[in-house]
Image: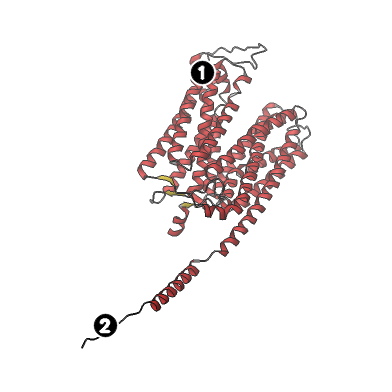
C-alpha cells in the first residue's frame, strides 16, 4: 500500500506530448491531507459556480447601475469569456512550473477583488474590464483546479473529480438564492418604478432609489467566500509545507524513443478538445434555449416554459452530486458511454414530440421526462472525460488549458449558431443538439479505439525492455567475466630464498 502511495506521488508525462517534465509533489504525510486539499478545491469550485451564475439574476441591477440597454450590458458575457480563455492559456504555461497552491490562491484572491468591484462601477467600459479580470482568474482556477485534482489522486481521481464539478453545480444553484434577498425589485416597498420606452434604450428598465439597489451585497458575500478559500490555501501550504516542483526534463534520447507515439497522443488531445467543444456547446445551448423553444416551438405559456429550464438544470445538479459515490463503482469509460447514450435517447424523444401541443397533453409528459433525462446524461461527461484523459495521457497544465479553450470556444460558438438558426425555425435547436450529440459520440468512439491501440503499442514496447531480474543476471555474468579475465592477467612471483 505504501509503494502505491509513493508511485502515485510521481506523475510522468506519459503522453510525452506537451511537456517531458516529471512532476514530483511533496505532499503532507499526515492521513487525510489529500482529502482536506480536495475539500479546499471543492470550496474553490463552489466559488467558481457562484461567480459564473451571479450575473444572471443581477443583470438588471448592473444595467441600472451603468445606465445602459440590455444589449449593451450583455457584453459582460463575451468579455468574461475572452478573459476565461486567456486565463486558461496562462495557466497552461505557469501551472507546472510554479507553486500550484500559491497560483490557485492568487487566482482566487484576484477573482474576489474583481467580483467585489463589479457592482460599484458606474461606467460600462470599466465594468467590462472588471469582468474580464474576473474571467482571467476563473479560467486559471478552472484549469489549475482540474489539473491539481488529477495530479493529487492519479488513477483514483474519478470520485474526487466528480465531487469537484458537483461543487461547481451547487455553487451555480446557490447563486440566485444568495442574490434574491438583495434584488432591487424586492428591496423596498417604497421604490417608484420608471420605464423607458425610448427605442434606443432596449428593454424597459425598472429604476429604484440608490439606497434600495443592494445587489452589491450579494457580490460582496461571494467575494468574501473566495477570499476565505484563498486564505485557506495559503494557510494549508504554510502549515503542511507543501510545495510542487518540476524536476529536470528527460534526456533527448528518451524523447526520441517516445516520439513514435507522441503524435498519436497529440491526436488524442486534439480529438478530446473537439469532443469538449461539442459537449459544452450542447450543454450551454440546450440549457440557454430550451425555454425559448418551449414558448416558440411547443407554444407553451411562459410560466410553464420556465419550469422546463429548471427541470434541466435541477437534474443536472442532482446527478453531479449523486455521481460522486457512483464514480467509485463505474470507470470513467463506462460513465462517458452511458452518459452519451442517455443524452442521445433523450434528444431523440424530444425530436419525436417536437410539434406544438398543450402542456396538459400526454405528449408534454414525454417532453418533461426527456428534458430531465438529458440533464442526467450531460451532467457527468466533463469530469468523467478528464478522468478518462488522465488514464491515457497525463493531463498537465498545457493539456488542460488546451481542453478548457476548446470548451470555451464551444460555449461561445454553438449557441450563436443555434441562435441564428432559431430565427428560421425553433426546431433547429433540437436538430442541432441531436447532430452535435451524434458527432460527439462518434468522436468518443474514435478516441477510445485510438487510445486502446496506442496502449497496445506502449505495452509491446515495454515487453521488449529487460526486466529487473534480467538486468541483475546480465550484470552478474558481466562481473564474473571481468573477474575471471583479471585473474588470468595477474601473476604472483614468490620471493626466492637467498643462500
> In the rendered image, which quarter is residue 206 located in?
top right
Residue receiving disc 2: 495
Q: Secondary structure at mark 2?
A: loop
Neighbours of disc 2 within 10 Å: few (<14), some (14-19), many (20+)? few
Foreground: disc 1 or disc 2: 2
User: In this picture, is 485 found above or below 89?
Assistant: below
Q: Residue at x 51, y 44 (%)?
A: 147
Q: Residue placed farthest to the bottom in the image? A: 499
Among the 4 quarters of the image, the one containing residue 237? top left
Left or right: where 378 falls relative to 111: right
Q: Position of residue 11 (x, y in %)?
A: 49, 51
- Give the quarter of the figure containing the N terminus: bottom left
Of mark 1 and mark 2, the one earlier in the sequence is 1
Coordinates of residue 198 in the picture (x, y in percent)? 66, 11
The C terminus - image quarter: bottom left
Residue 142 is at least partly visible in this image:
yes
Q: Residue 36 in the image: state x and y as whole percent.
A: 43, 45
Task: Name the residue that disc number 1 marks.
Answer: 213
Q: Secondary structure at mark 1?
A: loop
**Gap between marks 1 and 2, in whole Å?**
110 Å
Q: Nearer the viewer, residue 147 or 301?
A: 147
Rate crowding at label 1 as few (under 14), some (14 to 19) or many (20 or more) other CA atoms within 10 Å: many
Query: Of all residues shown, which one is farthest toward the front?
Result: 499
Residue located at (71% from left, 47% from top): 442
Task: From the viewer's side, name the closer residue of 62 and 101.
Answer: 101
Q: Position of residue 451 (x, y in %)?
A: 63, 53
Position of 1 relative to 163 (above/below): below
Amino acid at each position: 500500500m505504501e509503494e502505491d502511495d509513493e508511485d502515485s506521488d510521481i506523475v510522468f508525462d506519459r503522453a510525452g506530448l506537451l511537456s517531458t517534465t516529471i512532476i514530483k509533489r511533496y505532499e503532507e504525510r499526515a492521513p487525510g491531507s489529500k482529502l482536506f486539499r480536495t475539500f479546499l478545491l471543492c470550496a474553490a469550485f463552489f466559488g467558481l459556480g457562484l461567480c459564473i451564475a451571479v450575473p444572471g439574476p443581477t443583470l438588471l441591477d448592473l444595467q441600472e447601475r451603468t445606465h445602459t440597454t440590455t444589449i449593451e450590458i450583455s457584453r459582460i458575457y463575451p468579455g468574461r469569456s475572452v478573459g476565461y480563455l486567456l486565463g486558461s492559456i496562462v495557466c497552461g504555461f505557469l501551472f507546472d512550473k510554479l507553486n500550484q497552491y500559491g497560483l490557485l490562491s492568487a487566482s482566487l484572491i484576484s477573482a474576489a477583488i474583481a467580483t467585489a468591484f463589479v457592482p460599484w462601477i458606474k461606467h460600462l467600459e470599466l465594468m467590462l474590464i472588471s469582468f474580464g479580470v474576473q474571467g482571467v482568474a476563473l479560467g486559471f482556477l478552472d484549469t489549475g483546479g482540474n489539473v491539481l485534482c488529477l495530479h493529487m489522486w492519479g488513477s483514483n481521481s474519478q470520485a474526487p473529480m466528480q465531487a469537484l464539478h458537483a461543487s461547481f453545480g451547487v455553487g451555480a444553484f446557490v447563486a440566485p438564492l444568495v442574490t434574491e434577498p438583495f434584488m432591487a425589485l424586492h428591496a423596498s416597498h417604497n421604490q417608484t418604478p420608471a420605464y423607458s420606452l425610448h427605442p434606443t434604450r432596449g428593454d424597459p428598465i425598472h429604476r429604484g432609489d440608490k439606497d434600495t439597489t443592494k445587489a452589491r451585497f450579494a457580490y460582496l458575500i461571494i467575494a468574501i467566500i473566495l477570499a476565505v478559500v484563498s486564505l485557506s490555501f495559503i494557510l494549508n501550504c504554510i502549515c503542511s509545507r507543501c510545495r510542487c516542483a518540476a524536476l529536470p526534463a528527460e534526456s533527448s534520447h528518451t524523447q526520441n524513443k517516445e516520439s513514435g507515439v507522441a503524435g498519436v497522443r497529440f491526436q488524442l488531445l486534439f480529438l478530446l478538445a473537439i469532443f469538449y467543444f461539442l459537449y459544452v456547446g450542447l450543454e450551454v445551448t440546450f440549457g440557454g434555449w430550451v425555454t425559448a423553444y418551449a414558448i416558440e416551438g411547443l407554444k407553451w405559456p411562459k410560466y410553464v416554459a420556465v419550469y422546463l429550464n429548471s427541470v434541466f438544470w435541477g437534474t443536472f445538479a442532482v446527478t453531479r452530486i449523486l455521481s460522486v459515490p457512483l464514480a467509485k463503482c463505474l470507470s470513467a469509460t463506462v460513465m462517458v458511454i452511458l452518459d452519451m447514450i442517455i443524452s442521445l435517447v433523450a434528444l431523440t424523444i424530444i425530436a419525436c414530440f417536437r410539434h406544438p401541443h398543450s402542456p396538459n397533453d400526454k405528449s408534454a409528459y414525454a417532453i418533461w421526462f426527456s428534458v430531465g433525462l438529458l440533464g442526467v446524461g450531460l451532467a457527468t461527461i466533463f469530469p468523467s472525460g478528464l478522468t478518462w484523459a488522465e488514464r491515457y495521457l497525463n493531463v498537465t497544465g498545457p493539456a488542460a488549458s488546451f481542453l478548457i479553450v476548446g470548451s470555451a470556444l464551444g460555449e461561445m460558438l454553438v449557441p450563436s449558431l443555434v441562435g441564428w438558426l432559431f430565427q428560421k425555425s425553433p426546431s433547429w435547436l433540437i436538430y442541432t443538439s441531436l447532430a452535435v450529440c451524434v458527432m460527439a459520440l462518434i468522436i468518443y468512439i474514435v478516441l477510445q479505439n485510438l487510445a486502446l491501440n496506442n496502449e497496445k503499442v506502449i505495452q509491446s514496447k515495454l515487453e521488449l525492455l529487460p526486466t529487473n531480474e534480467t538486468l541483475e543476471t546480465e550484470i552478474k555474468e558481466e562481473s564474473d567475466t571481468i573477474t575471471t579475465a583479471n585473474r588470468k592477467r595477474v601473476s604472483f612471483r614468490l620471493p626466492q630464498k637467498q643462500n
